[in-house]
Amino acid sequence: MPYYRAVGQIPRKRHTQHRRPDGGLYAEELMGVEGFSAESALLYHRHAPTAILDSALWEAPGDAPTTANRPLLPRHLVTHKLDAGPADAVTGRQLLLANADVRLGYVAATVPSPLYRNAVGDECVYVEAGAGTVETTFGALMVGAGDYVVIPTSTIHRWLPSGPDPLRLLTIEASGHIGPPKRYLSAKGQHLESSPYCERDLRGPTEPLLAADPGDAGAPAHAAETADTTAATTAIARHTAHAAGVEVLVRHRAGGSRVTYAHHPFDVVGWDGCLYPYAFNIADFEPITGRVHQPPPVHQTFEGPNFVVCSFVPRKVDYHPQAIPVPYNHHNVDSDEVLFYTGGNYEARKGSGIAQGSISLHPAGLTHGPQPGAVERSLGAESFDELAVMVDTFRPLELGPAAAACEDPGYAWTWAGGRPV
Ligand SMILES: [Fe+2]
């Protein structure tokens, strides 16, 4: 749970009159999770957030059928093989792995995305490379390589890549809520001293986006003066000029719909609460190390429904004089384990073909461990420069169409030195 924030113009008391400069009332909206019994935010809109003009069917990409991991194999997916020309961060997502709790996709985004609302669950999007802005009803987040971007359920947003290179994204779409592990937090929700990151490391929106409705006297003056939001405001103006309303793609529990709103959803003048999008950079994750090999839970960063997200970051390694720094062979008997290799050299996987942008899937039912020779090579090492994101799921992952399109078929046999012919 992020900590409390207040951004923009809000009234001193909740649920009281909050008036525009022209005397009209702002429209208050409560966004809350778990039946309004957990985190929430109060947002103040210039226009009614309820006003819709149309709703039509939309086939959400990534809702493609998946297939079971049978016969059971460890898998190596080469995500950079999926690059396919112009793509946006929402409709360009290619489904790699999925179960009822979480879906993992990949996209190299080069163009702005449509406005999007995922009403099924929270998203945690990891930025492998590139830079851009995520515009949301709460404000904008500038994002770059190494950022986890956590977007709460039903937050209307869009992705705007910037710079010459694609915005490479690993998309982690939950069927529920994503947040820090409970063991990192005090009973009242503060990050504990034992947590590998804390509130100072989380970046939330700092001001409303303030969609530039032409002629809207309620638009506070400071919006266009902020460098971070100038590009966003320009982009929004293009949408708000559309007389027929503003289209938002909605992924919901029954499928996808294309909803047209009467007013641009980025019309919030202020909000407060503990529910909002935020970014956390993997470089701010402080690794926990020991004299001998530390188990994967020390790397945990987030938890979702029936899955966890962990960060393997550059660190000093085990300092017992007889330590073996790479992992032992292991079998997480209740989980499928996904690793996304996003930087440095991953010592345990040398010789397997794993490279930048690779994903390995090590499913329950098979023991996995270092590649041949990795244990001996690691002896005496003082540090690893590996950078990887791990997603462990408690239910088995199925393979999406993009997995078949980018799989390295030789990976499963690399521990045995190749498949006999
Ligand atoms: Fe593992």
Image (cartoon, grey):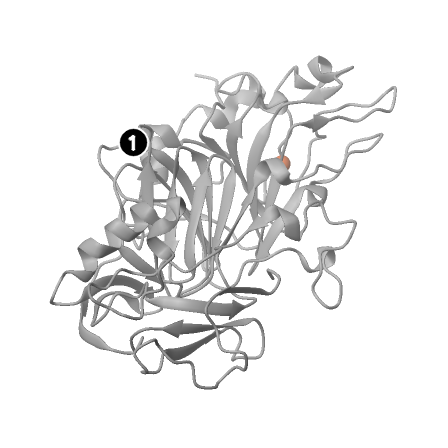
Mark 1 Cα shell of 10 Å, populated few (<14), some (14-19), many (≥20): some
Q: Nearer the viewer, residue 161 or 70?
A: 161
Q: Residue placed at 49% from the left, 24% from the top?
A: 354
Image label count: 1
Residue farthest along the right direction in this orientation: 321
Quarter holding the C terminus?
A: top left
Q: Residue placed at 52% from the left, 30% from the top?
A: 341
Can residue 70 be seen by looking at this rendering? no
Disc 1 within 8 angstroms of ligand 1 (CB)? no
Per the image, the residue denoted by label 1 is 83
Residue farthest along the bottom direction in this orientation: 16
Q: Residue placed at 30% from the left, 78% from the top?
A: 22
Q: Nearer the viewer, residue 89 or 211?
A: 211
Can residue 390 be seen by looking at this rendering? yes
| Amino acid type at mark 1 | Asp
Is 85 placed left or right of 44 in the picture?
left
Reply above or below: 37 against 207.
below
Residue 415 placement (x, y as % from top left): 58, 22
Is 37 placed left or right of 230 in the picture?
right
